[in-house]
């Protein structure tokens, strides 16, 4: 019974670390790199018949070239609410409505803005690592409790090492993801 708890704690730790990676990837998608990407508008909610709905459920969001995002609403009546939600989100983007579709030109980033975005990406990476450490701490606590309840001490030590190895592995993955995003942001 105690060994099942330990195995379950390790599985939960793996899932928690995967979730931290997924969350980091989603957050990094929202950071502008100077290239147009539909992911830049991924968290945008639009008022649709009185209910807030994700933008991608009321319109087709795509890129027509490396500097332009196009938004084709399913209904023409949605043009104004989509525009309003883009302004309200304060993304620093200006939508242009031609009566059929909305176009958003992505201005090139200044060097100063790129440096700020890199700092933000690194901060998100640190938050991901904090999440990893928190997950690790919970798993180690479960293992310590299991050892007190009769789980063999040497097996507990091996499980501790396994958790530490997992944490280190996922920390390296976070570093690589942030490094790639940094390179992407700094590329002119």
Image (spheres, rainbow, N blue to C red):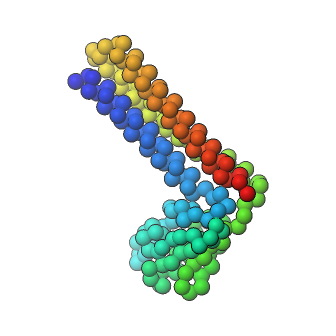
Q: Nearer the viewer, residue 186 or 114?
A: 186
Q: Is residue 109 left or right of residue 72?
A: right
**Visible residue check, residue 133:** no
Q: Is residue 55 left or right of residue 1?
A: right
Q: Is residue 87 above or below residue 101?
A: above
Q: Residue at x 31, y 31 (%)?
A: 8
Q: Nearer the viewer, residue 43 or 177?
A: 177
Q: Is residue 179 left or right of residue 61?
A: right
Query: What x and y, as percent, mark residue 105?
Result: 66, 72
Q: Is residue 37 left or right of residue 34?
A: left
Count of numbered circles on the image: 0
Residue most extreme to the right = 111
Quarter of the image for the N terminus: give it: top left
Q: Residue at x 43, y 41 (%)?
A: 18
Q: Nearer the viewer, residue 49 or 19?
A: 19
**Visible residue check, residue 75:** yes
Query: What x and y, as percent, mark residue 146?
Result: 31, 20
Q: Is residue 58 above or below residue 29?
A: below
Query: What x and y, as percent, mark residue 89?
Result: 57, 66
Quarter of the image for the C terminus: give it: bottom right
Residue most extreme to the left = 1
Residue most extreme to the bottom = 99
Q: Is residue 18 above or below residue 39?
A: above
Q: Residue at x 51, y 62 (%)?
A: 42
Q: Residue at x 52, y 47 (%)?
A: 24
């Amino acid at each position: 019974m105690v060994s099942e708890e330990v195995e379950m704690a390790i599985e939960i730790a793996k899932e928690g670390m995967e979730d931290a990676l997924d969350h980091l990837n989603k957050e990094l998608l929202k950071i502008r790199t100077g290239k147009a990407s539909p992911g830049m508008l991924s968290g945008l909610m639009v008022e649709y018949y009185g209910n807030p709905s994700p933008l991608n459920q009321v319109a087709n969001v795509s890129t027509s070239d490396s500097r332009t995002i196009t938004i084709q609403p399913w209904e023409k009546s949605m043009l104004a609410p989509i525009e309003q939600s883009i302004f309200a989100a304060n993304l620093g983007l200006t939508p242009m409505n031609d009566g059929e579709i909305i176009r958003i030109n992505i201005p090139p980033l200044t060097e100063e803005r790129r440096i700020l975005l890199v700092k933000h990406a690194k901060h998100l990476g640190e938050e991901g690592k904090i999440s990893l450490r928190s997950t690790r701490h919970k798993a180690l606590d479960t293992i310590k409790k299991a050892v007190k309840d009769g789980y063999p001490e040497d097996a507990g030590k091996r499980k501790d090492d396994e958790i530490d190895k997992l944490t280190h592995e996922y920390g390296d993955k976070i570093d690589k993801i942030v490094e790639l995003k940094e390179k992407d942001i700094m590329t002119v």
